[in-house]
Amino acid sequence: MKHFLNLKDIPANDLRKIVLDAKKRKQKRKNFHTLDVDKDSPLKGKLLVQMFEKSSLRTRLSFYLAIKQLGGEALTLRPDELHLTKGGESLADTAKILSTYGNGFMLRTDNDKKLEEFSKHLTIPIINGLSPLSHPTQVLSDIFTVEEIKKKPISKLNICWIGDSNNVLNSLIAASVKFSFNLNIGCPKNYEPKKFVIDWVKKNKRKINIFNDAKNAALNADVIFADKVMSLNDKVNKIKKSRDFKNFQINSKLMSIAKKDAIFLHCLPRGSEVSDNVFLGKQSKVWQQALNRVYVQKSILLYCFEKLR
Protein backbone atom coordinates (compact mmCIF):
# COMPACT_ATOMS: atom_id res chain seq x y z
CA MET A 1 0.00 0.00 0.00
CA LYS A 2 1.03 3.62 -0.51
CA HIS A 3 -0.15 6.78 1.23
CA PHE A 4 -0.92 9.98 -0.70
CA LEU A 5 -0.21 12.82 1.71
CA ASN A 6 1.90 15.43 -0.03
CA LEU A 7 3.26 15.83 -3.56
CA LYS A 8 6.73 16.64 -2.28
CA ASP A 9 7.01 13.17 -0.73
CA ILE A 10 5.96 11.21 -3.83
CA PRO A 11 8.50 10.31 -6.54
CA ALA A 12 8.12 12.33 -9.74
CA ASN A 13 7.88 9.14 -11.81
CA ASP A 14 4.91 7.96 -9.74
CA LEU A 15 3.13 11.29 -10.15
CA ARG A 16 3.64 11.12 -13.91
CA LYS A 17 2.27 7.56 -13.96
CA ILE A 18 -0.86 8.72 -12.15
CA VAL A 19 -1.46 11.49 -14.71
CA LEU A 20 -0.91 9.11 -17.65
CA ASP A 21 -3.25 6.51 -16.17
CA ALA A 22 -5.94 9.16 -15.66
CA LYS A 23 -5.65 10.13 -19.32
CA LYS A 24 -6.17 6.52 -20.44
CA ARG A 25 -9.10 5.98 -18.10
CA LYS A 26 -10.85 9.16 -19.22
CA GLN A 27 -10.54 8.11 -22.86
CA LYS A 28 -12.10 4.73 -22.05
CA ARG A 29 -15.11 6.37 -20.32
CA LYS A 30 -16.60 7.74 -23.55
CA ASN A 31 -20.32 6.83 -23.81
CA PHE A 32 -20.34 5.60 -20.19
CA HIS A 33 -22.99 6.77 -17.73
CA THR A 34 -21.84 8.40 -14.48
CA LEU A 35 -22.20 5.30 -12.31
CA ASP A 36 -21.16 2.73 -14.92
CA VAL A 37 -18.23 0.68 -13.65
CA ASP A 38 -14.98 0.57 -15.63
CA LYS A 39 -14.69 -2.67 -17.59
CA ASP A 40 -11.70 -3.88 -15.59
CA SER A 41 -13.35 -2.92 -12.22
CA PRO A 42 -9.91 -2.99 -10.51
CA LEU A 43 -11.19 -2.10 -7.02
CA LYS A 44 -14.18 -4.42 -6.92
CA GLY A 45 -15.07 -5.24 -3.31
CA LYS A 46 -12.97 -2.39 -1.87
CA LEU A 47 -14.40 0.14 0.61
CA LEU A 48 -13.14 3.72 0.76
CA VAL A 49 -13.97 5.46 4.03
CA GLN A 50 -14.13 9.24 3.75
CA MET A 51 -14.13 11.75 6.59
CA PHE A 52 -14.49 15.52 6.28
CA GLU A 53 -13.58 17.88 9.10
CA LYS A 54 -14.01 20.79 6.70
CA SER A 55 -16.70 21.51 4.11
CA SER A 56 -16.30 19.81 0.75
CA LEU A 57 -18.15 19.56 -2.55
CA ARG A 58 -15.77 18.62 -5.38
CA THR A 59 -13.47 16.37 -3.32
CA ARG A 60 -16.43 14.56 -1.75
CA LEU A 61 -18.20 13.96 -5.06
CA SER A 62 -15.10 13.10 -7.08
CA PHE A 63 -13.81 10.48 -4.64
CA TYR A 64 -17.29 8.96 -4.35
CA LEU A 65 -17.57 8.62 -8.13
CA ALA A 66 -13.94 7.52 -8.44
CA ILE A 67 -14.27 4.50 -6.16
CA LYS A 68 -17.70 3.61 -7.61
CA GLN A 69 -16.41 3.68 -11.20
CA LEU A 70 -13.50 1.45 -10.16
CA GLY A 71 -15.96 -1.10 -8.80
CA GLY A 72 -15.71 -0.29 -5.09
CA GLU A 73 -17.91 1.48 -2.56
CA ALA A 74 -17.62 4.64 -0.46
CA LEU A 75 -18.76 5.40 3.08
CA THR A 76 -18.68 8.97 4.36
CA LEU A 77 -18.27 9.64 8.10
CA ARG A 78 -18.82 12.88 9.96
CA PRO A 79 -16.31 13.74 12.71
CA ASP A 80 -19.10 14.56 15.15
CA GLU A 81 -20.39 11.00 14.81
CA LEU A 82 -17.16 9.42 16.05
CA HIS A 83 -15.81 8.75 19.53
CA LEU A 84 -12.54 10.26 18.28
CA THR A 85 -13.91 13.78 18.70
CA LYS A 86 -16.64 13.36 21.30
CA GLY A 87 -16.02 10.16 23.24
CA GLY A 88 -12.30 10.34 23.94
CA GLU A 89 -11.30 7.36 21.78
CA SER A 90 -7.66 7.56 20.78
CA LEU A 91 -6.57 8.20 17.22
CA ALA A 92 -4.59 4.95 17.28
CA ASP A 93 -7.67 2.92 18.21
CA THR A 94 -9.76 4.75 15.62
CA ALA A 95 -7.15 3.94 12.98
CA LYS A 96 -7.25 0.28 13.99
CA ILE A 97 -11.01 0.14 13.47
CA LEU A 98 -10.80 1.98 10.16
CA SER A 99 -8.15 -0.51 9.02
CA THR A 100 -10.34 -3.42 10.10
CA TYR A 101 -13.50 -2.31 8.29
CA GLY A 102 -12.18 -0.31 5.34
CA ASN A 103 -9.61 -0.71 2.59
CA GLY A 104 -8.68 2.95 2.22
CA PHE A 105 -9.18 6.20 4.14
CA MET A 106 -9.54 9.69 2.67
CA LEU A 107 -9.34 12.54 5.19
CA ARG A 108 -10.02 16.25 4.79
CA THR A 109 -8.66 17.79 7.94
CA ASP A 110 -7.90 21.04 9.72
CA ASN A 111 -4.76 19.52 11.28
CA ASP A 112 -1.71 18.26 9.37
CA LYS A 113 -0.39 16.42 12.41
CA LYS A 114 -3.55 14.32 12.42
CA LEU A 115 -2.77 13.13 8.90
CA GLU A 116 0.72 12.11 9.96
CA GLU A 117 -0.56 10.32 13.05
CA PHE A 118 -3.17 8.41 11.07
CA SER A 119 -0.53 7.35 8.54
CA LYS A 120 1.54 5.85 11.37
CA HIS A 121 -1.31 3.78 12.80
CA LEU A 122 -3.33 2.77 9.73
CA THR A 123 -2.62 -0.47 7.93
CA ILE A 124 -4.56 0.81 4.91
CA PRO A 125 -3.69 3.70 2.58
CA ILE A 126 -4.58 7.25 3.61
CA ILE A 127 -5.20 10.09 1.16
CA ASN A 128 -4.97 13.77 2.00
CA GLY A 129 -8.21 15.32 0.75
CA LEU A 130 -7.02 18.77 1.89
CA SER A 131 -5.13 19.99 4.93
CA PRO A 132 -3.98 23.42 6.13
CA LEU A 133 -0.60 22.95 4.44
CA SER A 134 -1.45 21.17 1.19
CA HIS A 135 -4.08 20.06 -1.31
CA PRO A 136 -2.24 17.44 -3.37
CA THR A 137 -5.20 15.77 -5.09
CA GLN A 138 -6.42 19.12 -6.41
CA VAL A 139 -3.09 20.16 -7.86
CA LEU A 140 -2.28 16.81 -9.46
CA SER A 141 -5.67 16.96 -11.17
CA ASP A 142 -4.87 20.49 -12.30
CA ILE A 143 -1.64 19.25 -13.91
CA PHE A 144 -3.76 16.75 -15.82
CA THR A 145 -6.18 19.49 -16.94
CA VAL A 146 -3.41 21.81 -18.11
CA GLU A 147 -1.75 19.11 -20.20
CA GLU A 148 -5.09 17.94 -21.59
CA ILE A 149 -5.98 21.43 -22.82
CA LYS A 150 -2.52 22.57 -23.90
CA LYS A 151 -1.60 19.19 -25.41
CA LYS A 152 1.99 19.41 -24.23
CA PRO A 153 3.93 18.63 -21.03
CA ILE A 154 3.51 21.26 -18.34
CA SER A 155 7.31 21.55 -18.22
CA LYS A 156 7.07 23.46 -21.52
CA LEU A 157 4.59 26.01 -20.17
CA ASN A 158 4.70 29.16 -18.07
CA ILE A 159 2.45 28.80 -15.04
CA CYS A 160 1.24 31.74 -12.98
CA TRP A 161 -0.47 31.92 -9.59
CA ILE A 162 -2.19 35.13 -8.53
CA GLY A 163 -3.39 35.33 -4.94
CA ASP A 164 -2.73 34.32 -1.36
CA SER A 165 -0.05 31.82 -0.36
CA ASN A 166 -2.15 28.92 0.87
CA ASN A 167 -2.34 25.13 0.85
CA VAL A 168 -3.15 24.94 -2.87
CA LEU A 169 -0.16 27.11 -3.74
CA ASN A 170 2.08 24.99 -1.50
CA SER A 171 1.11 21.94 -3.55
CA LEU A 172 1.51 23.84 -6.82
CA ILE A 173 5.02 24.81 -5.73
CA ALA A 174 5.77 21.16 -4.94
CA ALA A 175 4.42 20.21 -8.37
CA SER A 176 6.68 22.80 -10.03
CA VAL A 177 9.65 20.90 -8.61
CA LYS A 178 8.32 17.43 -9.44
CA PHE A 179 7.20 18.32 -12.98
CA SER A 180 9.93 20.91 -13.68
CA PHE A 181 7.79 23.83 -14.79
CA ASN A 182 8.30 27.57 -14.50
CA LEU A 183 6.12 29.12 -11.79
CA ASN A 184 5.46 32.83 -11.28
CA ILE A 185 3.66 33.88 -8.10
CA GLY A 186 1.91 37.22 -7.83
CA CYS A 187 0.95 38.31 -4.32
CA PRO A 188 1.25 41.26 -1.92
CA LYS A 189 4.51 41.48 0.03
CA ASN A 190 3.16 40.13 3.33
CA TYR A 191 1.43 37.17 1.66
CA GLU A 192 4.41 35.41 0.12
CA PRO A 193 5.09 31.67 0.55
CA LYS A 194 6.49 30.59 3.91
CA LYS A 195 10.27 30.32 4.29
CA PHE A 196 10.18 26.52 4.79
CA VAL A 197 8.44 26.16 1.41
CA ILE A 198 11.01 28.31 -0.39
CA ASP A 199 13.87 26.53 1.40
CA TRP A 200 12.52 23.16 0.18
CA VAL A 201 12.48 24.45 -3.40
CA LYS A 202 16.09 25.63 -3.09
CA LYS A 203 17.12 22.33 -1.54
CA ASN A 204 15.78 20.61 -4.66
CA LYS A 205 17.75 23.02 -6.86
CA ARG A 206 14.68 24.65 -8.37
CA LYS A 207 13.44 28.23 -8.40
CA ILE A 208 10.09 29.99 -8.12
CA ASN A 209 9.58 33.60 -9.15
CA ILE A 210 7.76 35.84 -6.67
CA PHE A 211 6.35 39.20 -7.76
CA ASN A 212 4.55 41.77 -5.65
CA ASP A 213 2.86 42.97 -8.81
CA ALA A 214 0.18 40.94 -10.59
CA LYS A 215 1.05 42.25 -14.06
CA ASN A 216 4.69 41.17 -13.85
CA ALA A 217 3.65 37.72 -12.63
CA ALA A 218 1.10 37.23 -15.43
CA LEU A 219 3.36 38.36 -18.28
CA ASN A 220 3.51 35.66 -21.01
CA ALA A 221 1.70 33.11 -18.83
CA ASP A 222 0.13 30.04 -20.47
CA VAL A 223 -2.01 29.34 -17.41
CA ILE A 224 -3.22 31.58 -14.61
CA PHE A 225 -4.26 29.85 -11.40
CA ALA A 226 -6.29 31.34 -8.56
CA ASP A 227 -8.06 30.35 -5.36
CA LYS A 228 -10.46 32.15 -3.09
CA VAL A 229 -8.52 34.92 -1.34
CA MET A 230 -11.11 35.66 1.33
CA SER A 231 -12.08 32.46 3.14
CA LEU A 232 -14.99 32.38 5.58
CA ASN A 233 -12.71 30.89 8.22
CA ASP A 234 -9.88 33.39 7.72
CA LYS A 235 -8.77 34.62 11.13
CA VAL A 236 -7.50 37.91 9.74
CA ASN A 237 -8.62 41.49 9.39
CA LYS A 238 -10.76 40.99 6.30
CA ILE A 239 -11.02 44.68 5.51
CA LYS A 240 -7.22 44.99 5.50
CA LYS A 241 -6.75 41.80 3.48
CA SER A 242 -9.29 42.95 0.92
CA ARG A 243 -7.42 46.23 0.61
CA ASP A 244 -4.06 44.45 0.28
CA PHE A 245 -5.36 42.36 -2.63
CA LYS A 246 -7.12 45.25 -4.38
CA ASN A 247 -4.65 45.21 -7.29
CA PHE A 248 -4.54 41.43 -7.61
CA GLN A 249 -7.97 40.71 -9.09
CA ILE A 250 -7.86 38.53 -12.19
CA ASN A 251 -9.83 40.48 -14.79
CA SER A 252 -9.79 40.93 -18.55
CA LYS A 253 -7.00 43.50 -18.35
CA LEU A 254 -4.74 41.11 -16.43
CA MET A 255 -5.57 38.18 -18.73
CA SER A 256 -4.56 40.34 -21.72
CA ILE A 257 -1.02 40.46 -20.32
CA ALA A 258 -0.79 36.67 -20.50
CA LYS A 259 -0.48 34.83 -23.80
CA LYS A 260 -3.44 35.09 -26.18
CA ASP A 261 -4.34 31.44 -25.69
CA ALA A 262 -3.83 31.50 -21.91
CA ILE A 263 -6.37 29.65 -19.79
CA PHE A 264 -7.75 30.46 -16.36
CA LEU A 265 -8.15 27.81 -13.63
CA HIS A 266 -9.73 28.10 -10.18
CA CYS A 267 -10.25 25.27 -7.69
CA LEU A 268 -13.48 26.86 -6.37
CA PRO A 269 -15.42 28.22 -4.63
CA ARG A 270 -14.75 31.63 -6.13
CA GLY A 271 -14.82 35.11 -4.64
CA SER A 272 -13.93 38.65 -5.61
CA GLU A 273 -10.40 37.62 -6.65
CA VAL A 274 -11.72 36.98 -10.19
CA SER A 275 -14.13 39.04 -12.27
CA ASP A 276 -17.28 37.45 -13.68
CA ASN A 277 -16.25 38.08 -17.27
CA VAL A 278 -13.04 36.06 -16.78
CA PHE A 279 -14.58 33.31 -14.67
CA LEU A 280 -17.46 32.83 -17.13
CA GLY A 281 -15.44 33.67 -20.24
CA LYS A 282 -13.89 31.54 -22.98
CA GLN A 283 -10.48 31.36 -21.33
CA SER A 284 -11.93 29.88 -18.16
CA LYS A 285 -11.72 26.09 -17.95
CA VAL A 286 -12.97 25.73 -14.38
CA TRP A 287 -15.76 23.23 -15.13
CA GLN A 288 -13.48 20.93 -17.11
CA GLN A 289 -10.99 21.31 -14.26
CA ALA A 290 -13.60 20.26 -11.69
CA LEU A 291 -14.78 17.22 -13.65
CA ASN A 292 -11.24 15.99 -14.25
CA ARG A 293 -10.82 15.45 -10.54
CA VAL A 294 -12.84 12.24 -10.87
CA TYR A 295 -10.38 10.72 -13.33
CA VAL A 296 -7.29 11.69 -11.37
CA GLN A 297 -8.79 10.54 -8.05
CA LYS A 298 -9.32 7.14 -9.69
CA SER A 299 -5.67 6.88 -10.61
CA ILE A 300 -4.62 8.11 -7.17
CA LEU A 301 -6.71 5.33 -5.62
CA LEU A 302 -5.08 2.77 -7.91
CA TYR A 303 -1.66 4.12 -6.94
CA CYS A 304 -2.50 3.74 -3.25
CA PHE A 305 -3.78 0.20 -3.78
CA GLU A 306 -0.69 -0.58 -5.90
CA LYS A 307 -2.80 -1.43 -8.93
CA LEU A 308 -1.45 1.27 -11.21
CA ARG A 309 -0.29 -0.24 -14.48
Image (cartoon, rainbow, N blue to C red):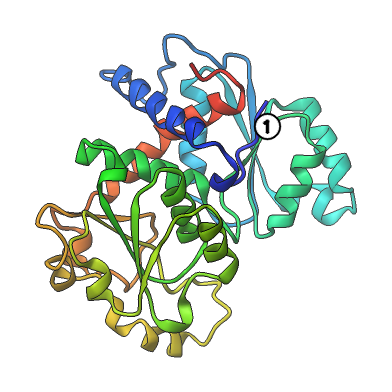
Residue 168 percent location from the top left of the image: 47, 57
Q: Secondary structure at mark 1?
A: loop
Q: Tell which of 281 and 175 is nearer to you.
A: 175
Image quarter (top left, top right, bottom left or bottom right) of the N terminus: top right
Residue 204 percent location from the top left of the image: 52, 52
Residue 280 percent location from the top left of the image: 19, 58
- In the rendered structure, the answer to whether residue 23 lies left or right of residue 284 reads right
Residue 288 visible to an observer of this rendering? no
Q: Tell which of 54 and 121 is nearer to you.
A: 121
User: What is the crowding at mark 1: few (fewer than 14 residues within 10 Å), some, or many (at least 20)?
Assistant: many
Q: Residue at x 51, y 33 (%)?
A: 64
Q: Residue at x 49, y 37 (%)?
A: 12
Q: Amino acid at mark 1?
A: Pro
Compared to residue 199, the image places residue 238 above or below, namely below
Residue 96 percent location from the top left of the image: 84, 34
State which quadrant residue 270 falls in. bottom left
The residue identified by callout 1 is 125
Compared to residue 198, the image places residue 112 above or below, namely above
- In the rendered structure, the answer to whether residue 174 lies left or right of residue 251 reads right
State which quadrant residue 296 falls in. top left
Q: Residue furthest left?
A: 260
Q: Residue furthest top?
A: 40
Compared to residue 79, the image places residue 145 above or below, namely above
| Count of marks overlaid on the render | 1
State which quadrant residue 98 falls in. top right
Q: Residue at x 55, y 70 (%)?
A: 194
Compared to residue 162, the image places residue 15 above or below, namely above
Residue 150 visible to an observer of this rendering? yes
